[in-house]
């Protein structure tokens, strides 16, 4: 359980740090935290119980990317 909570804390910390502009991609969150992409999706879903987290898609170099941003 402690590892699970630390993943939530890590993701929340990086969401707060990258809260300007469009937000932060799943790839970048994965690199920053060391958590696999599948884990990022699950932990962000868990974080939504306590925080408002926005999901937006943007096209970057013709590729559609998912960005997360936490409400201030």
Image (cartoon, helix red, strand yellow):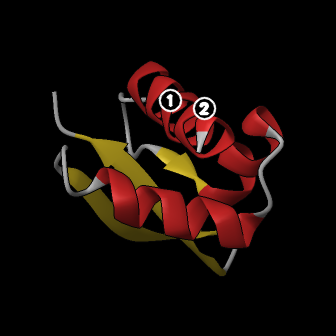
Where is residue 52 shown, x and y percent of the image?
A: 16, 49
Q: Which residue occupies the extreme front position in the image? A: 1
Residue at horizontal 19 percent and vertical 44 percent from the top: 51
- Above or below residue 13? Residue 68 is below
Residue at horizontal 50 percent and vertical 29 percent from the top: 9
- Above or below residue 44? Residue 24 is above
Residue 60 found in image quarter: bottom right
Classed neighbour count for the residue bearing mark 1: other residues with Cα under 10 Å, few (<14), some (14–19), many (≥20): some
| Quadrant where the image shows the N terminus | top right
- Above or below residue 60? Residue 25 is above
Looking at the rendered structure, the secondary structure element under dot 1 is helix
| Quadrant where the image shows the C terminus | top left
Q: CA distance from mark 2 to mark 1?
A: 5 Å
Instruction: Read off the residue under disc 1.
Output: 9
Q: Nearer the viewer, residue 19 or 12?
A: 12
Looking at the rendered structure, the secondary structure element under dot 2 is helix
Residue at horizontal 60 percent and vertical 32 percent from the top: 6
Where is residue 8 shown, x and y percent of the image?
A: 50, 40
Where is residue 59 shown, x and y percent of the image?
A: 54, 73
Q: Cβ–Cβ below 8 Å for labels 2 and 1?
A: yes
Instruction: Read off the residue under disc 2.
Output: 6
């Amino acid at each position: 359980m402690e590892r699970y909570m630390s993943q939530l804390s890590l993701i929340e910390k990086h969401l707060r740090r990258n809260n300007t502009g469009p937000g932060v991609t799943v790839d970048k969150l994965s690199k920053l935290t060391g958590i696999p992409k599948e884990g990022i999706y699950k932990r962000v879903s868990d974080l939504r119980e306590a925080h408002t987290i926005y999901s937006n898609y943007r096209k970057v170099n013709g590729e559609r990317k998912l960005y997360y941003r936490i409400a201030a």
